[in-house]
Image (tube, grey):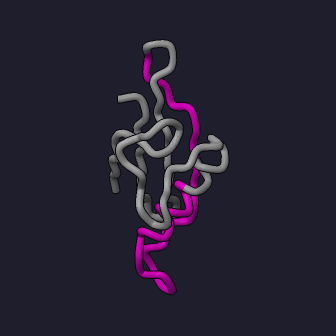
Amino acid sequence: MTAILATDCGSTTTKAILIEKVGGEYRQTFRGEAPTTGEAPFDDVTRGVLNAIMEVEELAGRKILDGERIITPQSGSEGVDLYVSTS
C-alpha cells in the first residue's frame, strides 16, 4: 500500500489529504479543501468531497477520480490503494 486518500467533512470545510509512502515512511504529501456542501442548494456532502479531491489531483499531478468515482486500487500513478473519510 503506497497511496492513501483521506477526507474529513467538517461543518464548513471539507479537507482531503494524500498520504504516500516515501522512502519507506508514510507522509502527507498534498492537501486540498473545499466548502462543505451538506446544506442547500446542494444538500449532498459528496460535492464538497469531490471538489477537495480535485484540488489534491491538481496539486499532485495525479489522477485520483474517474468521473465521480475514486480509482482504487492504485495503478501506476493513478488512483489510491485506500480511501477513508471522517465527519
Work out whether residue 51 or residue 9 is closer to the camera in this orientation and state it: 51
Residue 13 lies, in percent from the top left, at 52, 59
Span highlighted in magenta in the image: 25-53
Quarter of the figure that contains the C terminus:
bottom left
Is the N terminus in the top left, top right, bottom left or bottom right quadrant? top left
- In the figure, 38 relative to 61: above or below? below
Residue at horizontal 47 percent and vertical 61 percent from the top:
49
Query: Was residue 40 drawn as part of the magenta stretch in this picture?
Result: yes
Q: Residue furthest bottom?
A: 41
Across and down, in percent, residue 75 comes to 44, 40
Tell me: 87 left or right of 46: left
Q: Quadrant of residue 21?
A: top left
User: Where residue 31 sits in the image (x, y, percent)?
Assistant: 57, 43
Residue 19, x across and y down, in percent: 46, 33
Given residues 75 and 50, the one toward you in this image is: 75
Residue at the (41%, 40%) spot, across then down: 74
Q: Nearer the viewer, residue 39 or 49?
A: 49
Q: Is residue 65 above or below residue 59?
A: below
